[in-house]
Image (cartoon, grey):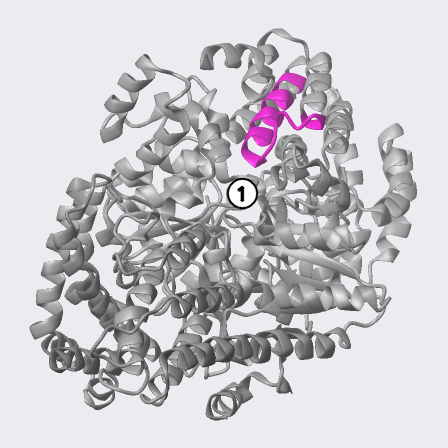
Amino acid sequence: MAQGITQLAPGLISFLKSLKTTPADPSVEHLISLLKRRQIRNSRPCAIATTALMLRVVGEFKGRDAAKLVERIRQVGRRLTAAQPREVVVGNIVRRVLGLVREVLDDNTGDSHTGSDAGHNTPTHHDSMTRPTLSSSISTFSPLRHAAAEPMDASMTSEMSDSSEFNRRPPLLTSHTSYAPTTSAPLVNSLFGLFSQPDDSNASTPTGAASPDGKSAHSLNLERLADLSRSTNIDLKSEVMDGIRELQDELEQSDEQIAGVALEHIHSNEIILTHTASTTVQKFLLSAAKKRKFTVVHAETYPHDNTATHGILLTGRKRETRLDEDEDPWKPLTAAGIPVYVIPDSHVFAIMSRVNKVILATHTVLANGGLVAAAGAHMIAKAAKEHRTPVVVLSGVYKLSPVYPFDIDELIEYGDAGRVVPYEDGEFVDKVDVEHPLYDYVPADLVDLYITNLGGHAPSYLYRIVADHYHTEDITL
Amino acid sequence: MSGPVEGEAAAPPAVTPQAPNDPAAPAKTDPKETKPADDGASKKPSGAELKKLKQLEKQAKRAQAKAIVPPATQQGGPPKENQKQREQKQSQKKDESRPLPIRRRPSQSNAVPQQQAKKESTRGQKNLGLFFGHLYSQPRQHSMVGASKDVHPAVLALGLQYSSYVICGSTARMVAMLLAFKAVIESYQTPVGTSLARHLTNHHLSPQIDYLRSCRPLSISMGNAIRWLKDLIIKIDPSTPEAEAKRDLVEEIDMFIRERVTAAQKLIRDQAATKILPGDVILTYASSSIVEQTLLQAHKAGVPFTVIVVDSKPLFEGKTLARKLANQGITVRYYLITGASHAVKDASKVFLGAHAMMSNGRLYSRVGTALVSMLARSHSLPVLVLCESVKFTEKVALDSIVGNEVAPASEILSEAERASLLPLEPHLPATHPSKNKAEDKHAADDAKSGPLDVIKWVEGSDNLHHLQVLYDVTPAEYINMVITEYGSLPPSSVPVVHRLSTNT
């Protein structure tokens, strides 16, 4: 029976299968329709699907023009995010791939031009730069941003020529309050060298080589693109594809990497509260269970995720991964000897006085340190705060989004009201407005610690990790 | 004849007033470390033996399960059981201010539930001791099987209505109980050689109460009403003719209901309705009769406002409320508790019903209330509690764990949810004890055995527990106002009002 469903039901598996045989363009359409119909949902499946698609898109890309590749990826990315703006992960992956392309460019041009240090420095420069830029970059589906940034996008994408870039450059520079963002040096240095900076930025070639960030990076990139198209010895495509494969590995391994630090965070006889059905959290707890004895209290997240929650506790599988034939099944926590108490969501406050630690799964982590997680997460985090219980959020870096939550409600998806009150109860459904939010926004101040596959971070530090992973020019797709 | 009767009679009253008598003394005087030992010591002569006895009886009872229970064990059973329960309950309630469960776990509840778990298959109740083990003193009764023969038919029916949540809500339960007691009193005949005042409370009313308690633990309001009623009966002049005494009692009960419930509710809703202003969005949690009346009254008065009902599984009481309000033409939005943080964003006031108001100003109400009021407070919404003074209690509580009511865990999974879990069956771990069983069964009859199997999976897996309680305690700082028939007050005034209402 399960086999039959596997063949029929469209979803991640069917998409990945069809991707092997279908060319890129129809696959894009395929994924868009799957996203729109919500047949692929939740962060991990979306990330996997997007990465696979990106691999395909880059693989089928003809030609050596890096600018065109960037444009192609952007275009696909824009369509995917437009299909399902609330799956922020899709946008994240696209941005990561764009970042890969730029990195490859940086490395190569850096090698050919001014030595290897340009590419090497890139991340650190970005770190210092990104903060101001981030706060001014707006989520891709915010109306504000569409008004402000769409024309720019259009110009940028329609004609990626040197001249247009240079034309745009001066106003952009002046739009910054200071020259600091355009400097190549890290922030600390820039404070010491305030007066030397104008000189640097005025110098033509060194600036380009040494400041690959901010808006000036665009022009730089374009110069490099031009160079690149001339120097044909670099296999841009294969390097980017290697990068995407690394990204796929990262997606696969992030759970294990997060689980690897479990013992640092869970001690014996703790009572840990978690909610919803999250593979990451389950693996984290399982890894701790190998060495330690503790107790898990699991809020079932009714009505959205309760089936998956019960499923994961009974069998170690969610409903959706049930269809997965080759996903490695893992034992449920209970089989590892960990007592698990399933409680309805309403019990969170009552139980919280005995809980030592709250571990939350997440849907998306936002640049300000807040997160979007399954409904109920906010009240759990809030109750934990009231009881001074630490809240730990587990999230792969791929869920980390450069999106800044100006309008939280935009991020919240509403689900099928029939899950709350079945439609058989027609009279009720008719008269009463039944609402079923699927996600909660949890502000950063309710979270004590983020654990990503890179380690543990304070919520206030997240912007930095965002800056490490996304190029500023990609933040608006 | 009257000698032993009196002797026995003297013991339980000390228990029933529940308040300031025995276990309070050790609680106060003992330093913490000697406490468990002392607790045990004070109980050992009676408690431990009774416990064993009770377990034996229960084992016997379980063994014969639904078959006819030998009357011998039954007769002996309930009183002792109940006495014991009362003791336990009492001590629990006394202990509320101290974080006792940890200490209690090894000493007490471990022993009891362990054996129950074995025979009852209610998966590892010993582990439930981690949170609410001290509350698993007796399984809830869902039938009339174990009832003492003294129990009045009206009370029997009422008990079943309690255990199946047909009558739910502390006021409704109290009123229903008093009405049933009226029937009990009317059909009561004082046996020769005793007086009504002495016999009725201990020998006739007590079995009724015990039966009700076995169906579902008594609500605070019921406890208050029982105390009041017993007080009333004991004070009856022995020289009063029986018929007259009974008539007086019935009248007093009617009066009590009228004064403490009907009139009180009217006063409260009159007052609370004035708090609803045009354009308000009133958020309420689950269902409270008094909140419902208030909203309807304001609606009838023509105030334009909307209501958000937040609800939670498994009782879905709010659904009934939402339906009633919507039928009256009020605009209602309905959220489940997971969406509560979205619901409070749109609300302007929060009206809550109460199961009880504790003397330390905390609100003891349907589980989830604390979450809603917490969120409301973080949004700076006024939180108003509507509560008749009959629900005030001198008990105090700091958290929701020491005193609570455990509900059957199988209620967590509704029929539909169980059905949706069925496809997982092939993935149950191979070590799962119920797996083989389930497979055999499925081979035999596929569709039919389905949903119930899921419960067996849960019960069968050693470490998986479903946990469900009915109430939680809302900190006083989340509550802005308590509206009672005595007026609107801050939660800190609860003990004062309680004294007022009990002393008059």
The image quadrant where one finds the N terminus of chain A is top left
Depicted B463 relative to depicted B345: above or below: above
Let me know if residue A229 appears in the view. yes
Q: Is residue B322 left or right of residue A292?
A: right
Dominant secondary structure, magenta: helix
Residue at image point 75% right, 73% down: B273
In the rendered image, is residue A455 in sight? no
Task: Please name the residue that numbered disc 1 is placed on.
Answer: A397
Identify the residue at image location x=49%, y=73%.
Answer: B356
* Residue B441 image point, x, y percent: 30, 19
Magenta stretch holds residue A42:
yes
- Residue B386, above or below A370: below
| Residue type highlighted by circle 1 | Val
Q: Which residues are magenta?
A: A35-57
Q: Would you identify the image quadrant in which residue A79 lies?
A: top right
How many residues crowd around disc 1 within 10 Å: few (fewer than 14), some, or many (20 or more)? many
Q: Nearer the viewer, residue A445 or B358?
A: B358
Horizontal side of B410 relative to A423 (left or right) equals: left
B408 in magenta: no
Q: Secondary structure at mark 1?
A: helix
- Where is residue B453, by image quadrant? top left
Measured as percent of width and height from the top left, residue A231 is found at 70, 21
- Across and down, in percent, residue B363 comes to 51, 74
Give left or right: position of A333 versus A170: left
For residue B495, side relative to residue B283 (left or right): left
Q: Residue at x 54, y 81 (%)?
A: B389
